[in-house]
Image (spheres, grey):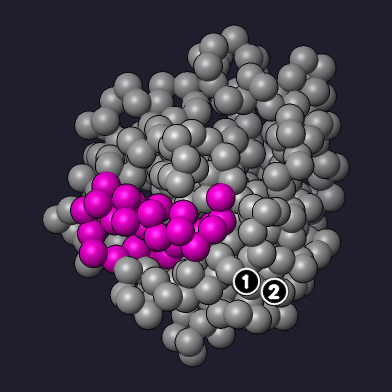
Amino acid sequence: MKHITLGTTAGGTGLDVGRLGLGCMGMSAFYSGAGTDGAESIRTIHRAIDLGVTLFDTAEIYGPYLNEELLGRAVASRRDQVVIATKFGTILHRGDGGRGLDGSAENVRLSVDGSLKRLGTDHIDLYYQHRMDPGVPVEDTVGALADLITAGKIGHYGLSEAGPETIRRAHAVHPVTALQTEYSLWSRDPERFILPLVRELGIGFVPYSPLGRGFLTGSIRSLDQLDDDDFRRSNPRFAGENLAANIRIVEQVDAVASQTGATPAQVALAWLLAQGDDIAPIPGTKRVTRVEENVAADAIELTADQLATLGAIEAPVGDRYADMTPLNR
């Protein structure tokens, strides 16, 4: 697999990763079938490593905690082959342990110690603030993260769903290695402000949900296919008439896939990889067959006409989340 470097200004070294990572969330939380087959999830992680995947993404909120524990077990004997990325800031460790935003220095310290224990490691390679806390200046949060880097508990830090001003302020305190946000043929908002900014600052970009929460695979045609507690049932883009209207996107991706002999998922990932050599998408799956399919996108080269056709696809109907207020701030 081809590699890229995230964060070319971070201490002058950056973080080397395979340009396709693995999002582990769905193995333990939020999607249909989560938590039902840990053995298959671990086989999937092992197969991903065998195929050259190095970047594995989790978060303390996934479960909560279960996904970090799963990933820790899976990579225990192969720690030197992987880059572990996890996230903090959406669990109130200073309070009752419930959900909520807390970017305080104390919460940062409490969070990292818990994640290190669950992951079974002495350091986290890439540590993200999952959502920005409007009640705590980002400078304070980054100051605590810089201390963790000095202490060797984390190698690099990143931000998830941060807005341009916040990114600049954080980067001024200590270089940001990676910015994670949703980006795909299904969600192209970062192209307007975020991508130009991270490229200006030398920050790597990690798109999550690069397959549109599974929609771009073409396999989801009805909410009846999803469990009752599946997060996507409350997602506006999957709701009622929006779902039917958004099928047109899959049909256009599928048309290009038929030209290339690839699957819709592979075409969607190949398009994303073609957007720059500073991008490392993290498609999620809990199945070996799917990770094999996704990794094969690394070898697909779309033509200029195909890229133009995909780039002309209109935006989907509906917001990315039912509540957009915690995003891009």
Q: Is residue 118 above or below residue 229?
A: below
**Residue 183 within the segment the image draws in magenta:** no
The residue beneath circle 2 is 169
* Image vertical order of residue 162 relative to residue 320, above or below: below
What's drawn in magenta, residue-wise?
102-129
Q: Residue 203 in the image: x percent, y percent?
A: 60, 74
Quick one: label 1 or label 2, which is nearer the N terminus? 1
> Residue 262 in the image: x percent, y percent?
54, 44
Nearer-the-camera pick, 121 or 204: 121
Q: Quadrant of residue 136?
A: bottom right
Q: CA distance from mark 1 to mark 2?
A: 7 Å
Label 2 environment density (alpha carbons within 10 Å; few <14, some 14–19, many ≥20) = some
Residue 23 visible in the shown view: no
SS assignment at label 1:
helix
Location of residue 324 by image quarter = top right
Instruction: Please give the residue where the numbered disc 1 appears in the rendered image.
Output: 139
Q: Residue at x 62, y 25 (%)?
A: 232
| Callout 1 amino acid | Glu
Label 1 CA crowd tier, 10 Å (few <14, some 14–19, many 20+): some
- Looking at the image, do the residues carrying marks 1 and 2 touch, with CB atoms under 8 Å apart? yes
